Amino acid sequence: MRARRDPRAERARCLVPGGARPRLARAGEAVVGAGPRERAVISIEAPAFWVAVVVEAPDGRLDRWARQSVGAARVLAGAEGGVVALLAGTAGGDALGEAGADRVVPLDGGIGPDAMPEMMLAALAPFVPRHVVLAETPAGGDWARRLAARAGWPIQTGVEMLSARQAIRPVGGMRRERAAAPARVLTLPRDRVASHGGTRREGRWCPAPERPADRGRMRVGPVVTATAAGIPLAEAPFVMAAGQGVVDFERFHALSRLLGATEGASRVVCDAGLMPRAAQVGASGTVLDARCYLAFGIAGAPQHLQGLGKVEHVVAVNTDLHAAIVARAGLSIIADAQAVMPALLDLLREEG
Amino acid sequence: MRSVVLLSGGIDPVSGRPAPPAGEIAAIGLALSVGGAVGGLHAGAPVPALRQAAGHGLEQVDCLQGGGDAVAVLAEALFAAPPDLVLAGRQARGGEDSGMLPYLLAERLDWPLLSGVVAIGATAEGWLAVTIGLAQGARRPAQIRLPCILCAHDAAPAPPFVFDRARRAVLRVVPVTGEEGPGMVAVEGTERPYRARPRLIGTASGGGGTVLEHPDPAEAARVLRDHLRALGMLAPPREGAADA
Ligand SMILES: Cc1cc2nc3c(=O)[nH]c(=O)nc-3n(C[C@H](O)[C@H](O)[C@H](O)COP(=O)(O)OP(=O)(O)OC[C@H]3O[C@@H](n4cnc5c(N)ncnc54)[C@H](O)[C@@H]3O)c2cc1C
């Protein structure tokens, strides 16, 4: 059976998320035909029950994982429930409504892990949520366990499949799995539940909870981010890689320093001894966990692309419009890497 | 300084053979880095994986046999002879694997807990300095009041395995009276062999992206800079930058 066409959805796809303006088409020109229009927003006053989600946005943006945890809360809320997001960080105005939250409660970011369960319980108290969802990040996984231990709530960690009725998680050393009704607290690994794709929700801001008294048992200092060169390739958030198309390595290194990117390379480049073996990206090298991958002169062989499985944004600079990497990239520049690298260097230096 | 490392037994996820989880070996490494007396503690009967864990640097592992709830049994043993420091892995491998035990124990003993510890520093006036490992190579210094519970980061340096040490390690059985506690919440649901499910693939840029054909280099550089900035990979321009 052929799927019925949905002209509204087709038009919506031609707009950037939020629908403010048309997005650029592959060929570079704008898709036309859709003027500005009212954005649909669902707002909900008194849902049958609440599902809470704790969202981390340390640098003011919601990453994919954070959106997926809000999506998981929406799955658990179904049609009747509402989603309240506890925001640890500073995501701006609409982002959480877009991601599917009906209410937003800001949490004091400066608070240490010891006081976190009290603060979460204070924020959750008016909502009496049926479930609390957290991403299984280093901080999120820690908060979830502290909350479950403090409140005496059952918890399912590392849920790999979720519906409103059941949650499935591995047990017994990843050799067995258990399916059960979703518990009070759930933690979510990356890329297991889709983020909210439906109509945006109101994301109404609610007052922050009182800051609980510090128990004076631990002092946590500021986060020290690693320098790009010091991060292991597998952990690096931003990787800039060279393939056969790069000959000017002096400029390549200068650019990676200026961008604050960790360096990677294709196998051919490592084989030639132009980059260390530790920099090899791909099936027989390192599998990346980066948010952004900037590829200069890389064809995108299947063995290379295997290393990009988890990368969110790929950007390619290549002379060949038909290179495989171009099909994987969110932005491709069909140009000579030796010309683009110095131009970008100049531009960034000019900015200071 | 006396440290106790909590050992869970555990199996290797691939072969199913007894093997200690990486986090517990890392915990042994952290305990050894502090110095002083280091012992292992296990709630349950002696199992082969404990001997393997001991091969990474423990002379003795106490096995609390006969008890009911693991949290209650461990809390009682630690309360009777309190060490300065209790170390654990991130999560067990072979049982419930939820990583909850140290947290429930901390709650029960009313001790502070920090997780993701990659290194331990010096003690001063009852405070212990530790380093916490975060995602993407970031680190965070912290201080915690003793006695405390620390969960090791899986990537904390692991001490080498010495076969002779494993062979000579003493697994001491300590009988305890079985007392049921509220500790671990009972689990329901159906259990079955694990089924690997594919992860979702990133939709953010799954192909079909913008293509810029043969721009002049300055134009390409500008587009690249703006794109990287929009992705949050590049700091926003400084005030009064040339062409903002
Ligand atoms: C068993 C096996 C395992 C492998 N494992 C890996 C692995 O782990 N990692 C890996 O990377 N490879 C691996 N390979 C090799 C892989 O198949 C490719 O050969 C390799 O990735 C190609 O590298 P490349 O893209 O740099 O080079 P090429 O294939 O030579 O591509 C160069 C690209 O640069 C472009 N270009 C040329 N000049 C310019 C210019 N001036 N400016 C801009 N662009 C330019 C070209 O259009 C082309 O697209 C493996 C192969 C095998 C058989």
Image (cartoon, coloured by chain):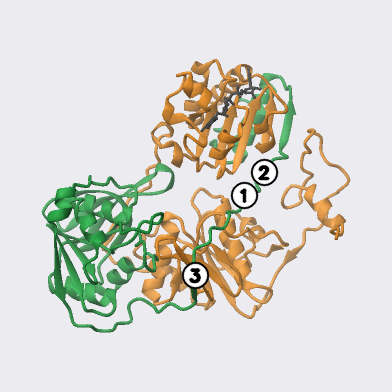
Chain colours: A orange, B green
Are circles 2 and 1 on residues that touch, CB within 8 Å? Answer: yes
Label 1: few (<14), some (14–19) or many (≥20) C-alpha neighbours in 10 Å: some
- Discs 2 and 3 carry the same chain letter: yes
Expressed as whole percent of the image width and height from the top left, the position of residue A206 reads 57, 68
Give the secondary structure at mark 2.
Answer: loop
Contact, CB < 8 Å: mark 1 with mark 3? Answer: no
Does residue A330 appear in the picture of this structure? no
Q: Nearer the viewer, mark 1 or mark 3?
A: 3
Distance between the Cα atoms at labels 2 and 1?
8 Å
Name the residue beneath numbered marker 3.
B192
Q: CA distance from mark 2 to mark 3?
A: 34 Å
| Relative image position of residue B164 (x, y in whole percent) | 14, 49
Identify the mark at residue B201; answer none if there is no mark: 1
Q: Residue B234, relative to residue B28: is it above or below?
A: above
Q: Secondary structure at mark 1?
A: loop
Q: The N terminus of chain A lies in which quarter of the figure? A: bottom right
Give, as a three-letter code, the residue at label 1.
Ile
Task: Mark 2 or mark 1: name the one nearer the start of the chain.
Answer: 1
Amino acid at circle 2: Gly
Chain bearing tag 1 is: B
Q: Residue A207, relative to residue A68: is it above or below?
A: below
- Total marks shown come to 3
- Residue B167 relative to residue A41: left or right: left
Tell me which numbered mark, 2 or 3, is placed earlier along the sequence.
Answer: 3
Q: Amino acid at mark 3?
A: Arg
